[in-house]
């Protein structure tokens, strides 16, 4: 579990040195994804992947997307829609794939901040992914859906990101 949390938060399992929030960049996250893919310790983070080959392909694609976006803005905070579209074109994927990879980075960055805060306050740190997701109140996939809706890149026939299980055009996308 420490290896998975290490990938999410950018921290190693052994306390070599603390990584600050400023050091948590897109390129560092891409390096951690590469290490996780090589180690095969990140299976639970990609939900719905059954075979090892698709698992490795998914992480390879996400790593490429994160690295490409890291060239524009290492912090990942000020990325433009045109840059995301360029990343999708360059990496041969969809905007949804780019938003999904970026959402995982954003979620991991927020989780890193919360874990730092818990450590400062001396409170217990989550020991499993389920506890971490409960602490965060969402999953990376939820964040990706809401990002797609905000950027206007969601299909009107897709399920609504608010979680109502209605179509977007019948729920939040009504005009």
Image (cartoon, grey):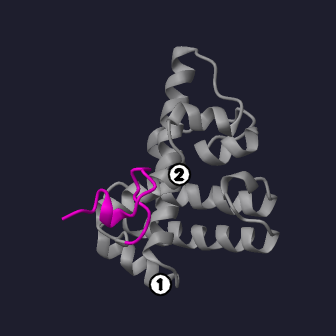
Could you say which is closer to the camera, residue 63 or residue 154? 154
Residue at image mark 1: 90
Badge number at residue 140: 2
Magenta stretch, main secondary structure, is loop
Label 1 Cα crowd, 10 Å radius (few <14 / some 14-19 / many 20+): few
**Mark 1 secondary-structure assignment:** helix
Query: Compared with residue 35, is residue 94 higher up or lower down, i.e. above or below?
Result: below
Please tell me which of labels 2 and 1 falls first in the chain. 1
Could you say which is closer to the camera, residue 14 or residue 105? 105
Give coordinates of residue 46: x percent, y percent: 67, 58
Q: Residue furthest top?
A: 122
Is 40 inside the magenta-drawn segment? no
User: Magenta part of the protein: which range?
Assistant: 157-175
Q: Residue at x 47, y 60 (%)?
A: 102
Query: Compared with residue 62, is residue 145 higher up or lower down, i.e. above or below?
Result: above
Label 2 Cα crowd, 10 Å radius (few <14 / some 14-19 / many 20+): many
Could you say which is closer to the camera, residue 113 or residue 72? 113
């Amino acid at each position: 579990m420490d290896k998975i949390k290490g990938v999410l938060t950018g921290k190693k399992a052994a306390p070599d040195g603390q990584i600050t929030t400023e050091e948590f960049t897109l390129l560092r996250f891409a390096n951690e994804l590469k290490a996780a893919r090589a180690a095969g310790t990140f299976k639970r983070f990609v939900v719905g992947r059954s075979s090892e080959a698709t698992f490795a392909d998914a992480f390879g694609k996400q790593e490429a997307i994160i690295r490409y976006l890291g060239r524009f803005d290492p912090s990942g905070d000020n990325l433009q829609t045109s840059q995301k579209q360029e990343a999708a074109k360059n990496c041969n994927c969809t905007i949804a794939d780019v938003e999904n990879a970026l959402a995982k980075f954003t979620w991991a960055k927020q989780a890193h901040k919360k874990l730092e805060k818990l450590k400062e306050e001396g409170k217990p740190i989550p020991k499993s992914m389920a506890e971490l997701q409960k602490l965060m109140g969402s999953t990376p996939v939820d964040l990706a859906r809401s990002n797609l809706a905000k950027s206007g890149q969601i299909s009107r026939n897709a399920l609504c990101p608010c979680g109502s299980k209605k179509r977007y055009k019948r729920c939040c996308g009504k005009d």
